[in-house]
Amino acid sequence: MTQSEIAIRKRADRRSFLKNSLAASAATVGVGLLSSSLSAMGADHDGGITEGDAAILRFLAAAEILETDLWVQYTELAGQDAPDSGYKTGLIQLDGDMPQYISDNTDDELSHELFINAYLKSKGAKPVDLEQFRTLEGSQVTDIPGVASKKRLTNLTQLSVDTSWWVRYRSSDKNPDLGDTFPNAVPTLATGKFPAIPRNNAELEIGNTNVPVDTHVQAIANTAGFHFGFIEQGGTSLYASLAQRVSNVEVLRIVLSIGGTEIMHFQTWDDKAGNAIPLTDGALVFPDLTADIPQPETLQSNLIMPEPTVFLSKKFPACSIIRPTATKGVAMGAVKGLTADGLFAGQTPDFFEFLRDLAEEADEARREI
């Protein structure tokens, strides 16, 4: 873990307590496999887990490591402790609490990563380590010390953000599990390669708190706002889908409990993305989703709770649900979705092979009765 990540998690007493506890747990199991149950785990902890459950947890651990990596980048540049800048101000235009929310989301993903790996070790299962793939260049901002020198797992500078999730959750008659598809709320954002973080000092605009922000800088902040929702809606569906393949009750408890926080993250970002400032920056166009005109329901910005829609079969009444939650190929689907997003641009063939192997093993897991 880098020094910056350690500093991030020590920002406040609450975070410091949580992260120090988890780090201590991870360090303990790193010396050798735990020989007895973790005291907080409850009576079920002494039992083993199936290979399928371990495969599911390993894939989720990898997903959390990747999420931590990208959220750390957002936190360094616009989190609670990041210096004032045009980029940070641009995000604050979406919501005044954005820096706090970004920092908290980062803390949550880091806690998930550490917990799942520690739990795997406690069961004699192999944890997930992606450090060998930390090879990507991130932001080259030098006005914030340490940012440009770090190697990353994820690339936030060339994103093609799928915004069809926005329409999907507002649809009252379609469900991807039944084969339905959805248009993008911001079509141009899905067709190019756009930065969601400042790539250099000029795009960061350190010290700038003026409103309005430069159009290009605001476009980067808007892109980040929609990317937050894209990432967290993926986690929402991933946990709900893989929970259906779990055998061990305690593992199910873990998947459902962590999955619940992913849902909370998603609804937060769903709400904030709708406040993106309308603008045109070259080929990138953000429409006004808050316009006081007759908006189609699928674009209505204040519909942040899942609209009831068809579920399981069209013969049943509409139901408000997480979507999608079908289990077939869900892990590999997550890999393909993140890859199409541009999140892994520049990664090595070994990285993709490793991630695909984890996904295949998770998708092969079956619930054992």
Image: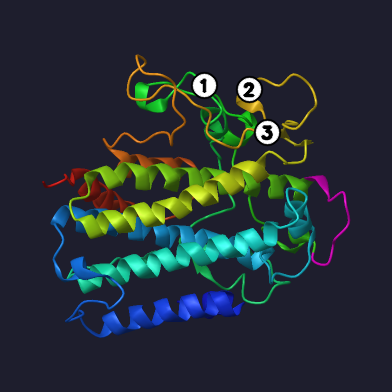
Label 1: few (<14), some (14–19) or many (≥20) C-alpha neighbours in 10 Å: some
Image position of 36 with respect to 225: above or below: below
Q: Residue at x 73, y 51 (%)?
A: 95
Q: Residue at x 46, y 40 (%)?
A: 340
**Mark 3 — residue?**
301
Instruction: Tell me how far mark 1 sits from mark 2, CA to CA.
Output: 9 Å
Classify mark 3: helix, strand or loop.
loop
Q: Which residues are magenta?
A: 206-215
Q: How is the image coloured?
A: rainbow
Amino acid marked by disc 3: Ser
Amino acid marked by disc 2: Glu
* Disc 1 and disc 2 in contact, CB within 8 angstroms: yes
Q: Nearer the viewer, residue 175 or 2?
A: 175
Q: Is residue 315 visible?
A: yes
Sequence-earlier tag: 1 or 2: 1
Instruction: Tell me how far mark 1 sits from mark 3, CA to CA.
Output: 15 Å
Label 3: few (<14), some (14–19) or many (≥20) C-alpha neighbours in 10 Å: many
**Mark 2 — residue?**
297
Classify mark 1: helix, strand or loop.
loop
Q: Quadrant of residue 311?
A: top left
Q: Quadrant of residue 282?
A: top right
**Left or right of 88 in this view: 208:** right
* Disc 3 and disc 2 in contact, CB within 8 angstroms: no
**Left or right of 278 in this view: 211:** right
Q: Residue at x 27, y 53 (%)?
A: 252
**Mark 1 — residue?**
172
Instruction: Tell me how far mark 3 sits from mark 2, CA to CA.
Output: 9 Å
Please tell me whether residue 207 belongs to the stretch shown in magenta: yes
Label 2: few (<14), some (14–19) or many (≥20) C-alpha neighbours in 10 Å: some
Q: Nearer the viewer, residue 24 or 282?
A: 24
Q: Is residue 348 visible?
A: no
Q: Position of residue 362 (x, y in %)?
A: 24, 49
